Amino acid sequence: MKKVFRYLLYTVGIVISLLLIFVLFVQFRGIPTYESKEAKVVVNSTPEKVLHGKKLASMLCVKCHLNPETNQLTGKFLADAPKVFGEIYSKNITQSKEHGIGNWTDGQIVYLLRTGIRPNGTFIPPYMPKFNGMADEDIESILAWLHSDDPMLAESNVVPPQSEPSWFTKFLCTVAIKPLPYDGSPRALPDTNDAVTHGKYLATFQLQCFACHSHDFAKNNDLQPELSEGFFGGGNPMIDYDGKTVMTANLTMDEETGIGSWTEEQFVKAVKTMQAPLGKTLSYPMEPYYMLDDQEVKHIYAYLKTIPKIKNRVVRR
């Protein structure tokens, strides 16, 4: 009996030691690095592309990278990033060759946006979205804007502090969250005259509305968004201006807990002006998407009408 007990203690000790080694390995190794490649891309910049790129960037990039002190995309502390990810700072993405992305090729930028891998091989965890399914035309428009003379992009050598990802973030990136695959195959724009198809593209691959409005960032499926846990059912904890937790809204058409009672007109008004039915005003981290035209928002609404309803009553302040 004593031998059995001794062997049991040895086994428990070995298991605890291995777990401790793993914990320390994850902590000190940090987020894994990967081979960085260059996507094949040719950008023929036109005023129309620059304008479209600025529209996309204003919804996808500016919020996180715009420093209110410099009024440029020099990076800042992301106070509204979920605390579980750690202390997160966005990067300088101005045209600075030393501290921004001025030395990056278009192919390197595209590879980062598609996979999450920077030119130096470092991988960006889930707090930055990956645009694996975005159409080539949209990606090229963003590139055209990044090369433009927009004052927000002018060369600046401001260096934001380094992010301090949590152990949990390092763990996720070690065992579960990996760079997205990208083989360079073309990504075409959908038929913009098909309301549901176009709305699906806007809500999943371009604007990535599902990322916030599904159940959990860590359980989102970036390659097949509709397989994300709680797809558009809301309840994903985010941080508001006061540092308080706010649950994202249920955007399925459930009549009791979602937006099933909203009309198309009410949805358009809410998305573009933050004014919801019954006189309610939507709160941060939701922001007004006034850059979208009415047809784009109507197409998103048309797509949301096709997805399965989820009964999930989200308590919001």
Image (tube, rainbow, N blue to C red):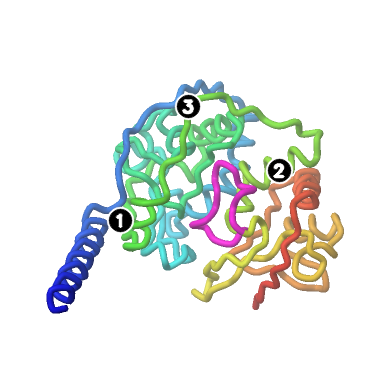
User: Mark 3 sits on what residue?
Assistant: 183
Query: Is 28 colored magenta in this rendering?
Result: no
Is 228 drawn above or below residue 139 in the view shown?
below
Please, is residue 236 above or below residue 3 in the view? above
Q: Earlier in the sequence, mark 3 or mark 1?
A: 1
- Secondary structure found at label 2: helix
The amino acid pointed to by label 2 is Lys
Q: CA distance from mark 3 to mark 1?
A: 30 Å
Q: Amino acid at mark 1?
A: Gln
The answer to whether 250 appears left or right of 121 in the picture is: right
Judged from the image, the secondary structure of the residue bearing numbered disc 3 is: loop
Q: Is 250 displayed left or right of 256 in the figure?
A: left
Q: CA distance from mark 3 to mark 2?
A: 23 Å
The residue lying furthest to the front in this view is: 1
Give the mark, 2 or 1, whose residue is nearer the N terminus.
1
The numbered dot on residue 162 is 1
Instruction: Return the disc, 3 or 2, that comes first in the chain's sequence.
Output: 3
x then y, percent, for residue 18 = 21, 61
Of residues 307 and 103, the one drawn nearer to the viewer in this rendering: 307
| Mark 2 Cα shell of 10 Å, populated few (<14), some (14-19), many (≥20) | many
Q: Which residue is at 54% across, 31% downward?
A: 144
Q: Are marks 3 and 2 in contact (CB under 8 Å)?
A: no
Eyeballing the image, is 26 above or below 201? below
Q: Is residue 265 left or right of residue 2?
A: right
Magenta segment: 214-229
Q: Is residue 43 left or right of residue 213?
A: left
Mark carried by residue 200? 2
